[in-house]
Amino acid sequence: VQLVESGGDLVQPGGSLRLSCAASGILFSRSAISAMGWYRQAPGKQRDLVATITSRDSTHYADSVKGRFTISRDSAKNTMYLQMNSLKPEDTAIYYCNLVTTDGQNSWGQGTQVTVSS
């Protein structure tokens, strides 16, 4: 499984971005995926969960992003998304997508930088 993130950018506080995570080597339409999600890592900090989505499209969000971020996926495009609205400086981080298969394979993308600054 390979994951490639895109969509990171420099944005002003209050702005929006949509991150994409394109997957290859696995099909979203099959039931081989246990869960997918987005994580982020700010400089000098640990990698933290942002949002997850299961094979049944059940979602979970970190408290810090609830009501502002939306995770989704498009099986036809084999791509997962993170829509980020009302961005704050504290959202600045490298964002990584993650996929776990039902047989336990755990894959990460290379990350995409999101910077929120005026």
Image (cartoon, rainbow, N blue to C red):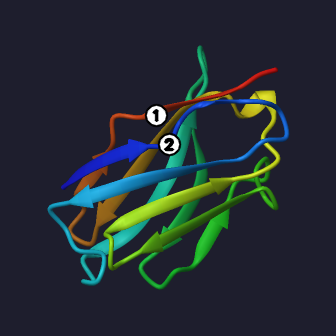
Does residue 9 show up?
yes
- Secondary structure at badge 1 equals strand
Task: Say the numbered circle drawn on residue 112.
Answer: 1
The mark total stands at 2
* Dot 2 amino acid type: Gly
Q: Position of residue 104 (x, y in %)?
A: 25, 62
Task: Say the numbered circle drawn on residue 7.
Answer: 2
Q: Is residue 117 above or below residue 74?
A: above
Q: Are marks 2 and 1 in contact (CB under 8 Å)?
A: yes
Q: Say few, some or many: other residues with alpha carbon within 10 Å of mark 1 (under 14 / 14 to 19 / 20 or more).
A: many
Q: Is residue 72 above or below residue 7?
A: below
Q: Quadrant of residue 89?
A: top right
Does residue 47 show up?
no
Left or right: 31, with 19 as reference point: left
Q: Position of residue 99 (x, y in %)?
A: 35, 58
Left or right: 80, with 87 as reference point: left
Q: Say few, some or many: other residues with alpha carbon within 10 Å of mark 2 (under 14 / 14 to 19 / 20 or more).
A: some
